Image (cartoon, rainbow, N blue to C red):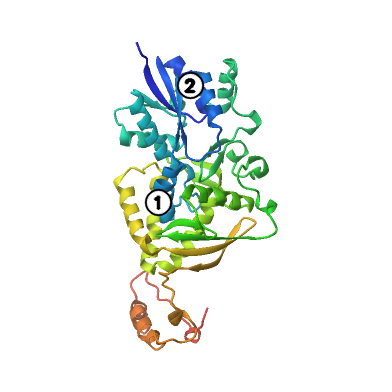
């Protein structure tokens, strides 16, 4: 009789290497390992063999890099979605797609459950569980970290050593990492003390410390069509290749390093260091283009939408009506976000070096210090008087009370020096 199957989200890292034998010891099931390629640096042949050697019935590798970029990264970029001012959602955008792929393989294999290696303290358990629930509410979800006896990475290593299973990492380099096409994250070791400076030279994989970057600045030009980057330095480039090229360029100049103490979904604070060189360049360029292509009210409201989308994506709520509706709004704002942006990269910093668009709202005839036909300086007086009418009315009320009447308690009039009126500052 064929054993029931469990599909395991497999990366070949420490957690999932432990999970295969643990599942076999605790469940009377066959393990189908599924590797989801979202652009992480990985030797898939070696990882596939490791899964089989560790006890998996089979191992599949799903290359979804293009889908990841087009359906998850670009929507976040167009929204300028960001979590707590710094985090560009590298892990957060990939997890919903990974969950979707896991469900696809679970259906193909006739599996009764999906397992993942997310811990009971982290955000990924939320993202995986909600993604799986969105497509397969009937499948059981097994998260060993929430139920097994192991309590640390050191205990995981000991678990493998007792079973004579090779440990897929060096003990002295046991950061908890996640990497994909968009970023690399680092947690653990000295990062667990927010007062300690991170050991960048030991930690970083894609980016050099800014002080190690070249002394000569680099320039890069990006072109966008309706909010989506389509060319690099004048050459049409597909999304995956474009991000890879920017990762190499930005990483060599120390771009995109973030050290953040963030609020996890489960309520605790945690510290992580993120490398997002290509993503940081794209976010900066996209925002520069929006500055000349969007009107003030649209831009201001879109900023709020970006914050909300960042919260939703971070919290695993990708497959929800609100996220989808907000993305539709964002897409409507991007119809005129077309043009080119030139940036200067230097020792960890990005600065603008020129922006142009056929839909630019910047009009020299109005904005220039030289008076043009479209702007009459005299019009400003009436505008300012109406714009400031509430200020004028309140001031008149305060003067009336100062001249003899008593203001209600708590409404102390502001004393102004008439000599200071009109002073610029």
Q: How many labels does the image show?
A: 2
Farthest residue toward the top?
1
Q: Tell me if residue 25 comes above or below residue 314 in the rendering.
A: above
Residue pointed to by mark 2: 20
* Among the two numbered marks 1 and 2 on one chain, the one whose residue lies closer to the N terminus: 2
Which element type, helix, strand or loop, lies under badge 2?
Answer: helix
**Label 1, label 2: how far apart the Cα atoms are:** 35 Å
Crowding near pointer 1: few (<14 within 10 Å), some, many (20+)?
Answer: many
Q: Tell me if residue 20 comes above or below residue 418 in the rendering.
A: above
Could one spot residue 132 in this view of the protein? yes
Q: Tell me if residue 283 comes above or below residue 30 in the rendering.
A: below
Res 18 label: none
**Residue 319: quarter of image:** top left
What residue is shown at x 59% (from left), y 44% (from top)? 194
Residue 421 in the image: x percent, y percent? 47, 84
**Residue 319 left/right relative to 247:** left
Which element type, helix, strand or loop, lies under badge 1?
Answer: helix
Residue 379 in the image: x percent, y percent? 37, 86
What residue is shown at x 42% (from left), y 36% (from top)? 98
What residue is shown at x 34% (from left), y 75% (from top)? 407
Residue 305 in the image: x percent, y percent? 37, 56
Quarter of the image where the N terminus is located: top left
Q: Is 164 or 406 nearer to us in this picture?
A: 164
Residue pointed to by mark 1: 75
């Amino acid at each position: 009789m064929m054993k029931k199957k469990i599909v395991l989200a497999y990366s070949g890292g420490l957690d999932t290497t432990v999970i295969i034998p643990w599942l076999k010891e605790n469940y009377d099931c066959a393990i189908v390992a599924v590797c989801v390629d979202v652009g992480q640096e990985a030797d898939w042949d070696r990882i596939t063999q490791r899964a089989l050697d560790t006890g998996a019935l089979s191992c599949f590798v799903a290359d979804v890099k293009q889908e990841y970029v087009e359906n998850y990264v670009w929507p976040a970029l167009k929204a300028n979605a960001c979590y707590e001012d710094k985090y560009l959602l590298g892990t957060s955008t990939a997890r919903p797609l990974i969950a979707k792929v896991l469900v696809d393989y679970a259906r193909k294999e006739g599996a009764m459950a999906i397992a993942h290696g997310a811990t009971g303290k982290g955000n990924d358990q939320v993202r995986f569980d909600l993604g799986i629930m969105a497509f397969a509410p009937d499948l059981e979800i097994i998260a060993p970290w929430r139920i097994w006896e192991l309590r640390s990475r050191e205990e995981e290593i000991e678990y493998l050593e007792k079973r004579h299973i090779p440990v897929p990492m060096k003990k002295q380099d046991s950061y908890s990492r996640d990497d994909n096409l968009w970023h690399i994250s680092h947690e653990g070791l000295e990062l667990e003390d927010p007062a300690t400076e991170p050991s960048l030279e030991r930690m970083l994989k894609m980016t050099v410390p800014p002080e190690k970057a070249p002394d000569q600045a680099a320039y890069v030009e990006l072109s966008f069509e309706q909010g989506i980057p389509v060319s690099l330095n004048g050459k049409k480039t597909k999304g995956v290749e474009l991000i890879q090229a920017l990762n190499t360029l930005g990483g060599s100049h120390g771009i995109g390093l973030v050290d953040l103490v963030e609020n996890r979904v489960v309520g605790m604070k945690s510290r992580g260091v993120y490398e997002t060189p290509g993503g940081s360049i794209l976010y900066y360029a996209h925002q520069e283009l929006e500055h000349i292509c969007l009107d003030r009210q649209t831009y201001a409201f879109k900023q709020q939408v970006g914050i909300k989308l960042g919260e939703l994506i971070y919290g695993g709520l990708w497959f929800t009506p609100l996220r989808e509706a907000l993305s539709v709004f964002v897409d409507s704002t991007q119809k005129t976000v077309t043009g080119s942006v030139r940036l200067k990269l230097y020792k960890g910093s990005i600065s603008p070096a020129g922006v142009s668009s056929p839909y630019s709202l910047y009009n020299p005839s109005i904005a220039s210090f030289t008076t043009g036909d479209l702007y009459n300086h005299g019009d400003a007086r009436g505008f300012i008087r109406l714009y400031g009418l509430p200020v004028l009315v309140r001031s008149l009320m305060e003067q009336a009370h100062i001249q003899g009447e008593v203001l209600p308690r708590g409404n102390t009039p502001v004393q102004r020096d008439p000599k200071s009126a009109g002073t610029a500052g």
